[in-house]
Image (cartoon, helix red, strand yellow):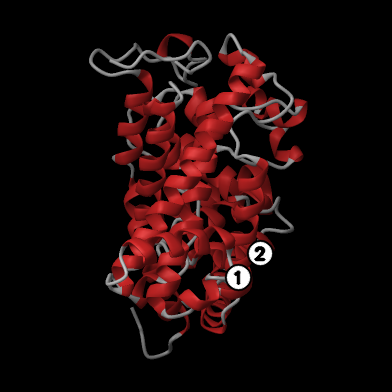
Amino acid sequence: MQTLAQYAATSDSTIGRQVYEAPPNYRSEYQRDRDRIVHSTGFRRLEYKTQVFVNHEGDLFRTRLTHSIEVAQIGRALARALDLNEDLTEAIALAHDLGHTPFGHAGQDALNECMSNYGGFEHNLQSLRVVDVLEEKYAEFEGLNLTFETREGILKHCSLPNARKLGQLGERFLKQHQPSLEAQLANLADEIAYNNHDIDDGLRAGLISVQQLLEINLFEEHYRVVKDLYPQLSERRATHEIIRRMINCLVGDLIETSKQNLVSISPSSIEDVRQYSSAIIMFSEQMIAMNLELKQFLRNNLYSHFRVYRMSKKAHHIVEKLFDAFINDTKLLANEYRRKAKIMESSDGDVGRARIVADYVAGMTDRYAISEYNRLFDPLQLT
């Protein structure tokens, strides 16, 4: 059994849940969190929410679900190497995208614009809303009633106005404190996963080429090694080998740099971690620069590719039109959300109504959003 570091999160040191529950008999508190996340409706929906490519464009591209599983795998490996809590890291990783809209960042940007007069839309805050309120499964409480530490990790970013409404959970944004090391680690595991796996999907889709990627130091370094070792390897297998080595390189750098930081800072508890002035889990300066080069390449060559841009414009249009239709006539909403919109409007006015509409649209999968759009706006589709 792994011995955790003194500054790791443990079930014994948890700040607890919003509604008290007796400790589980055969699992840790964070295992219970992970299990509730895996069994949630929001988690299942991730299978049909896009990462970069719209879900119907192909079966082999990553979705929010496969991405979340990949983040959890990287996160657990990092946590084990640093003597941190693997179960908490996994729970955060599996839940971190629960609030994402259909169509990835294009959908998120569109919904934020639609909500500009109603408090805005933040996908991290929406992920928290999913686990705190929107999941309706348990008899004794709303949401999943997760531990403070898992909820803290889910909320990677938060605007100050919203942080002020969150009580203890929002204090770190106001005081510029840090989350647990497990939360810091899950955040960087997310970055490692999406940067490298977006390369794989971009190559598979033919939107970027190996020749272009050779301009990137991190890719070029491992490309040369793989070509020297395996000159006869097919391009598909060579690409996988290069990306595997890139991930391993990033993971190794993160572990070694974080270990050095922990020795230097020498925190004695999770509270020491929280009150430290900056993140402790991080890459080396050299790796930060190489990773930034990779992110800029993806932004300029993959995310801005005309095919991705066309999809993004369509996605923006669909989300905007759905929101406008529902906000102006809540009778168009599914019965459950129509009822909620009426209740929220009676207590919070237009803002309350808009928040329920945002919940409905954000919870849609790519294909459901497309179907709803067609049902509302295609005159030949009458049901």
Seen as rendered, the residue at the extreme bottom is 380
Q: Please determine whether, in this image, residue 274 is positioned above or below residue 63.
A: above
Mark 1 vs 2, N-terminal side: 2
Residue type at tag 1: Asp
Tag 1 secondary structure: helix
Q: Residues within 10 Å of mark 2 (few under 14, many from 20)?
A: many
Of residues 191 and 167, the one drawn nearer to the viewer in this rendering: 191
The reply to whether dot 1 and dot 2 touch (C-beta < 8 Å) is yes
Residue type at tag 2: Cys
Q: Residue at x 35, y 83 (%)?
A: 382
Q: Quadrant of the N terminus?
A: top left
Of residues 353 and 110, the one drawn nearer to the viewer in this rendering: 110
Q: Please determine whether, in this image, residue 31 is positioned above or below residue 363.
A: above
Decide if residue 329 is on the left or right side of residue 382: right
Q: CA distance from mark 1 to mark 2?
A: 8 Å
Position of residue 202 measured from the top left corner of the image (x, y, whole percent): 45, 72
Q: Residue at x 30, y 65 (%)?
A: 230
Q: Residue at x 45, y 53 (%)?
A: 246
Q: Please determine whether, in this image, residue 312 is positioned above or below residue 246.
A: below
Q: Please tell me how many numbered marks the rendered image carries.
A: 2
Position of residue 343 measured from the top left corner of the image (x, y, whole percent): 54, 46
For mark 1, what is the residue? 324
Tag shown at residue 141 = none
Q: Is residue 62 visible?
A: no
Q: Please determine whether, in this image, residue 343 is positioned above or below residue 311.
A: above
For mark 2, what is the residue? 114
Of residues 206 and 37, the one drawn nearer to the viewer in this rendering: 206
Between label 1 and label 2, give the one nearer the viewer. Answer: 2
Decide if residue 328 is on the left or right side of residue 231: right
Position of residue 354 measured from the top left corner of the image (x, y, whole percent): 61, 56
Figure quadrant of residue 266 = top right
Q: Is residue 289 visible?
A: yes
